[in-house]
Image (tube, coloured by chain):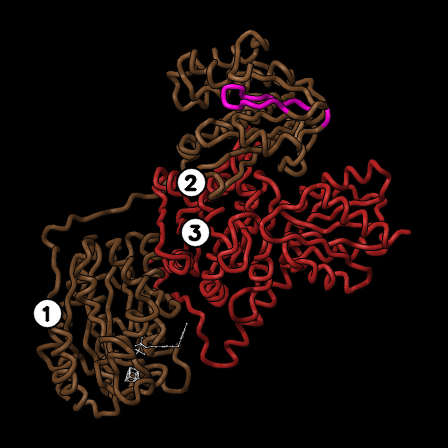
Amino acid sequence: MEQTKIVTKSKPTGFYENFDRKVGKDKKTTHYCPGCSHGIVQKLVAEAMVDLGIQDRTIFISPVGCSVFSYYYLDAGNIQAPHGRAPAVATGAARARPDSIVISYQGDGDLAAIGTSEILHAANRGENMTVIFVNNAIYGMTGGQMAPTTLVSQKTLTSPAGRLVENDGFPIRMAEIISSLGAPTYVERTACTDSKNIMRTRKAIRKGLQLQIDKKGFSFIEILSACPTNWKMTPKDSVQWIKENLEPYFKLGVLKDISDTREARSRSQPIFDPATVFGVLGLKKEEKQAVRTSKFAGERRLKIAGFGGQGALTAGALIAEAGMNEGLHTSWIPSYGPEMRGGTANCSVIISDKRVGTPIVTTSDVLIAMNGPSLDAFENDVVKNGLIIVNSSMISRKVARTDVRVVYVPLTEIASELGLKAMANSVAVGVFLQHEKILERKTVCDVLTTSLKKQSALELNFKAIDAGMTFKEGQKKGITQ
Amino acid sequence: MKHELIKGNEAVIKGALLAGCTNYFGYPITPASEIAEAAAYYFPKLNRCFIQAESEVAAINMVYGAAAAGSRCMTASSGPGLSLKQEGISYLAGAELPAVVVDVMRAGPGLGNVWPEQSDYNQIVKGGGHGSYKNFVLAPNSAQEMCDMTIQAFDIADKYRCTAVVLTDGCIGQMMEPVKFPDKVVVPQEKDWAIHGTAETRKNVITSIYMSTETLKDLNDRLQKKYAEMQTHEQRSEDFMVEGASLIVVAYGITSRIAENAIKELRAKGLKVGMIRLQTLFPFPKDRLQKAVPLIKAMLAAEMSAGQMVDDVKLAIEHKCPVEFFGTYGGSVPTVGQMSDAIEKAYQKHTS
Ligand SMILES: Cc1ncc(C[n+]2csc(CCOP(=O)(O)OP(=O)(O)O)c2C)c(N)n1
Ligand code: SF4
C-alpha cells in the first residue's frame, strides 16, 4: 500500500521498543487491523512528539474506542479517559500541569456523539491542548454501529438499511462546528489516504503541537480515517472509499487559523505562601486566647423576617457575629433558594452559652417582624413571655397574642429620618439590644466597623442602633398609633 | 486563627485552599452553589484554577484529569449533579485516583426540591456507579467540620488513593457558625505515580481498563484490601449523652443536631436516651455501635430519607438489638418536637 511508504516501516521513535503493556504474547505489533488509520496517525503523533522534543512533557489522553490502548505503544505519560470525556480529562491535566503538552485523541463516536458537550466546551475555553479526531464514520471498537459521522445511506449494524435522514439526521461536520467558535486557534481537516494527504496530516499534527508549545491554545485536527474491518473492505478499497464518499461531504482543508494573531498565554504558579494565603482568605491570627466576655447564661432563639432588601438576614448575621465575639456559641441559618425571591426572607439565629443543637428556630424567644407577612407567619411560634419587635411602619395590625411582650417601633421611618431607609434593620438590632440585654452595643458596633460593606454609612448605622436602643413607645408614632 | 462566622459551604473552600487544593471544577446547583462561588472568588487570587464546567459530568472528568496529573483537586454538587458524577467516580475508583467531592444534599428523587434531605446516602456510601468500589465518606454536622473534614478528605484521598466525599446537607451548607481555621497551609506533595509531564513520570499510566481477568481481579483485590484497612483504622463517631442510656439514637449531619436538642429535653424528663453521631459513613462506625449493643435495649436510626442509613445500622449490629426508624423526606427538616416524640415512642416501646 502506498500509505505505508510515508510512515516509517520500522517502529517509529516515540513508540515503546516492546509493547510490554499489551495483553497476549505478541509484544511487537499493534492491535490495530491492517489498513486501520489509527496505526498511521499514532505513528505520526509519536514521531512529532520526539522531533519537537516534547516527549517528556507529553500527556496523552486515550479515549474509549479502538485507540483505548494507545498507552501500549506511545512512550509518553498516558491517561485513559471515560467514553467521550477525553477533552474534560485533558482540561484537568492541562490546568494542573500548564507546562505539559496535552494530546486529546478521540474517535467519532467518542467525540461527536457521547462527548459533544466536552469537546465543544474545551474548544470554547481555548484550552491549551491539541485534539486529534479520527473520523472513520463508524463505531470501530464495538463492532461497526452507526456513528454521528456515518454517511447518509451508509450501512452499519445499527443502520442496516443505510443511514436514514428521517430517523438519524445528517452526519455531523465537527471541524466546521469547532471552527465557528471564537477561541480555537487552528482547525484543519485532513485525510489518511495517499502520501500527499498523509503528509498534510503529519504537518497539521506538528502545527497543532507547536502551537501548544507556544502556549497559543486549542487546535483541532480532524482526520478522515479508514476502518476496513467494519466497512468490510480491503485496506486499498477503504482509501478509495474515503476519497469518493467521505471527502465530498467532509471537505478537506484549513477551516480556521488565527495562530498569527493569537497571543501566547501562560499560567502562573499557584501560591502557597502562608502570609499571602491568610491575607487572601481574610484569616486573622488570634492574638490572645478568646475569652467569654458575656455574662449571659442560657439560650435565645431569634427569628428575623422581612421582605428581601429589608436586611433581615444581615441583622441576624450581625447579632450572631457579635455573640461569637463575646465568646458565646452562635448559629445563623437563612431560608434559602427560590423562597428568597420576592416573598419573605427570614433567618434563624441562636445565641447560647452551650453548644448549639439544631440551628433551625421553630419556636422563637424573639421575633423581629419587619413586614406584615412575617408577623402573620411567625407570631404563633413565639414562646410564652417571648419578645416580638414589630415594624409599625409596615405593619398596621396589632399582635393578637396576649402572652408575649411586644414593642411597636416604626423601624423604617426612624431609619428614613436618619437618612437611610435601608438601615431599618440596624434600628431593629438596637431595639433587640435594649430589650434583651444579652449583647453589648460595643461588640455589635465593632462588627459593623469590620464588616459593613458601605463604610461611609458606618456612623449612620451607629446612630440607627442608638435610635433603636433609646426608642420609647409613644415617643414616635408608627402608622397604627 | 481567630474565629470567623462563616457559612459551611464557604468554609469548605477556605479549608480546601489551606489543604493545598489547586484545582476546583464545578457546576452551579442549589444548595451547593456557594461552594463554587467561593471557589471562583478565592482560587484565582492564589493562582489556583477554578473552572465552571459545562456539566457535572465534565467537572468530575476534569477532576479525573487533574488528579491523574498529580494535583489536589475537587468538585462539589448536590443530588442531581452527583447522579451525573457517578460515572466519573467509578472511573476514579478504577484508576485509583485521589479526589475530593462535596455533596450538599437536597431533596429527591428527580429534580425534587432544594430543601435539605439525606437521601443521597445510598448513592454515595454504597458506591453509586458501576463496580465494587467505595468512597470514603465523611459526614460533618457543623460549619467547623465542613472545614476540618474537607481538609481531612484531601489527606485521606491521597493516603488511600480514593475518592473522599464530604456528605452534608442543605442546612449544614447554608448555616453560618463560628469556625476556627487552622494556621497552616499545606504545600501539596508530588506523587510519583502521577503524570506530571516530566521525564520522571513519562513511564506512568493511569487507566481503569484491565483486559485480563487476572489483572482486573488484582485491582479489585487491591481495592477491597484498602476498604478493609479503612474499616479497621478510620471509623469515626461521637458520643452524645450515651452514659447509662437504654436507647441510642444513630444519626448524622443536621439530623444529629436536632437529636441533640431532643435528647437533652428527654433526659431532663428522666428518659435514658443518648446518641452515637456518625462522622464517617464509610467506613461505617460498626465497632462503636456493636460495643453499645449489650448496654442498651434498642436503637433508633434517624435520618432525612425514607430509610437508607438505617440498613447499615442493622447490618453493623447484625440485628442484635431492635432498630427503630424515624425518617422524614420531601425537604422538610424534622422539628425538635417531632424528633422527641419519635425517640420517646421508641423508648417506651422497648423499656416498659
Ligand atoms: C458509557 C459507555 N457507553 C458505551 C460504551 C461502548 N463503546 C465502546 S467504544 C464505543 C464507540 C467507539 O467508536 P469511536 O469513538 O468511533 O472509536 P473507534 O473505535 O471507531 O476508534 C462504544 C459505544 C462505553 N465504553 N461506555
Ligand atoms: S475495528 Fe476499525 S478502527 Fe478498530 S482497529 Fe480495526 S480498523 Fe481500526
Are the residues at dot 1 and dot 2 in contact (C-beta closer than 8 Å)? Answer: no
Tell me residue A199's x, y (percent).
11, 74
In the image, the segment drawn in magenta is A384-399
Query: Do the residues marked 2 and 3 share a common chain?
Result: yes
Residue drawn at the location 22% of the way across and 75% of the way down: A171
Residue A5 sits above or below residue B191 on the image: below
Tell me residue B140's x, y (percent).
60, 46
Which picture quadrant has residue A432? top right
Q: Nearer the viewer, residue A321 or A16?
A: A321
Task: Give the chain of mark 3.
Answer: B
Which picture quadrant has residue A321? top right
Disc 1 marks a residue whose amino acid type is Gly
Q: Which mark is residue B5?
A: none
Tell me residue A397's x, y (percent).
57, 23
Residue drawn at the location 52% of the way across and 80% of the way down: B214
Q: Which mark is residue B73?
A: 3
Reading the image, the residue beneath label 2 is B38
Name the residue furthest top: A475
For chain B, what colour was chosen? red
Disc 2 marks a residue whose amino acid type is Ala
Q: Which mark is residue A253?
A: 1
Q: Secondary structure at mark 1?
A: strand
Looking at the image, is mark 3 or mark 1 nearer the viewer? 1
Which picture quadrant has residue B136? bottom right
Q: Residues within 10 Å of mark 3 (few under 14, many from 20)?
A: many
Looking at the image, is mark 2 or mark 3 nearer the viewer? 2
